[in-house]
Image (cartoon, rainbow, N blue to C red):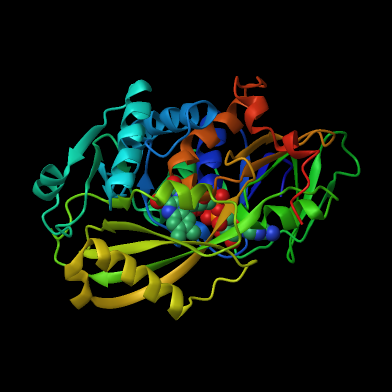
């Protein structure tokens, strides 16, 4: 195969969005995926595109940019990716949690995002299936839902129409400098050796393994999450629901299992019930104990779920980063090598802006304004606690 401009490694939603932007800007691009598109975390997740959970500063800036990009991108996609502005409801179990919701509403409104506090009675009117003893909550009408797996496939089809070469079933087992070309790279799979000027490592939690081949260490850790899929009446809940403590679970750096309610309906009439967070290496086995903990938590908020039928379950790995910001950009000292990972539980939301940033660096050769905040090199002096 002829020398390419760019090789992207990883066919999840992040790799797909990078491929879309790079091919859209006219670069000859190949994407290498070891299994099939969305075979990693981008099919083992929820599909929430949330703004209210983003911290002010770079994270919120990335989120707001990405939501705008999603709104532009979806009309250009073929097939139904189930993109809908369903809003989300934050549910407060007690007065303390309601107080936190009040603070979140104030903080989010200050960022120009619509948010309304709900007293107990208002919450019941909006979501009648919720337990009657809940203290209240908040509604964020601007949030979206999407089907991440369908979106990955559809974005890759768009990129293919723009010239993307998509290689499935090939695993990159070696990354090395091109021997005869300054600044160039080679990516070897079991079948072939591919060459390009730029490499984008968008291999999710497995990016660390790829970069390890070059003696580059990133502090990304797989943070396992399990989802229980249940059969539920289509209108049992009207918005995706998250409990007030969800943000604490996200930001807790602890190795202990975190369980906080996340429930969303799909157009197929199933409810996805999450979510758990746990550091368990690269293990994706489903634990019945964790599923039971998810079901108990969900039933606390939506009592009718006690009678619901479990259909299936799955586990995925969030690419956790120590400061809760992704790692996007060039790797210092390795000209032409880029990273796009570390989005933890926000990779679906942040995929389009990630593609856009990679496009700015590689195709337009400009360094985006947020470059320092998301630089893969910012952890050079990071030492995890023992
Ligand atoms: C339970 C759960 C719920 C979540 N809910 C949400 C949510 O509601 N909203 C949100 O925004 N985010 C959510 N996330 C996070 C989101 O799923 C991830 O951030 C996102 O999917 C990461 O996408 P990615 O493309 O980086 O990684 P992946 O989708 O994992 O893609 C990486 C790809 O690289 C491939 N690969 C790996 N190594 C190689 C190699 N050597 N050669 C070739 N290919 C390779 C893999 O096969 C894989 O397909 C959730 C995650 C989980 C686990």
**Residue 46 visible somewhere in the drawing:** yes
Q: Residue furthest right?
A: 179
Q: Position of residue 189 (x, y in %)?
A: 74, 61
Q: Nearer the viewer, residue 135 or 272?
A: 135
- Work out whether 128 lies above or below 55: below
Q: Image check: 167 left or right of 13?
A: right
Q: Position of residue 145 (x, y in %)?
A: 31, 47
Q: Position of residue 157 (x, y in %)?
A: 44, 48
- Work out whether 298 lies above or below 154: below
Q: Residue furthest front?
A: 95
Which quadrant is home to the C terminus? bottom right
**Residue at 76 percent of width and 36 percent of height:** 331
**Residue 38 visible somewhere in the drawing:** no
**Residue at 74 percent of width and 39 percent of height:** 379
**Residue at 48 percent of width and 39 percent of height:** 350
- Work out whether 224 lies above or below 319: below
Q: Image check: 358 left or right of 269?
A: right
Q: Position of residue 300 (x, y in %)?
A: 26, 65
């Amino acid at each position: 195969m002829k020398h390419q401009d760019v090789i992207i490694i990883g066919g999840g939603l992040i790799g797909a969005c990078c491929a879309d932007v790079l091919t859209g800007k006219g670069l000859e691009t190949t994407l290498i995926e070891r299994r099939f598109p969305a075979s990693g975390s981008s099919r083992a997740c929820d599909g929430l595109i949330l703004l209210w959970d983003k911290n002010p500063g770079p994270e919120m800036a990335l989120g707001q940019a990405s939501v705008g990009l999603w709104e532009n991108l979806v009309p250009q996609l073929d097939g139904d990716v189930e993109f809908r502005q369903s809003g989300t409801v934050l549910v407060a179990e007690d007065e303390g949690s309601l107080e936190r919701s009040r603070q979140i509403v104030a903080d989010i409104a200050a960022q120009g995002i619509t948010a309304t506090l709900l007293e107990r009675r208002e919450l019941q009117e909006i979501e009648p299936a919720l337990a009657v003893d809940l203290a209240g909550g908040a509604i964020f009408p601007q949030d979206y839902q999407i089907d991440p797996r369908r979106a990955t496939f559809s974005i890759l089809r768009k990129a293919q129409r723009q010239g993307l070469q998509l290689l499935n079933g090939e695993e990159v087992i070696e990354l090395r400098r091109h021997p005869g070309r300054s600044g160039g790279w080679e990516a070897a799979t079991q079948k072939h050796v591919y060459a390009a000027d730029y490499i984008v490592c968008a291999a999710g939690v497995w990016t660390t393994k790829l970069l390890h081949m070059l003696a580059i260490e990133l502090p990304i850790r797989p943070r396992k999450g399990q989802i229980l899929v249940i059969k539920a009446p289509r209108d049992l809940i009207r918005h995706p629901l998250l409990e007030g403590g969800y943000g604490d679970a996200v930001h807790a750096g602890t190795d202990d299992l975190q369980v906080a309610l996340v429930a969303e309906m799909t157009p197929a009439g199933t409810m996805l019930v999450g979510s758990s967070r746990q550091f368990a290496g690269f293990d994706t086995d489903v634990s019945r104990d964790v599923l039971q903990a998810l079901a108990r938590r969900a039933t606390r908020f939506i009592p009718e779920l006690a009678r619901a039928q479990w259909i299936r379950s799955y586990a995925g790995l969030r690419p956790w980063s120590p400061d809760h910001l992704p790692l996007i950009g060039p790797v210092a000292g390795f000209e032409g090598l880029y990273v796009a990972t570390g989005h933890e539980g926000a990779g679906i939301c942040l995929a389009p802006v990630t593609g856009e940033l990679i496009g700015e660096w590689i195709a337009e050769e400009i360094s985006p304004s947020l470059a320092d905040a998301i630089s893969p090199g910012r952890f050079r002096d990071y030492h995890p606690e023992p």
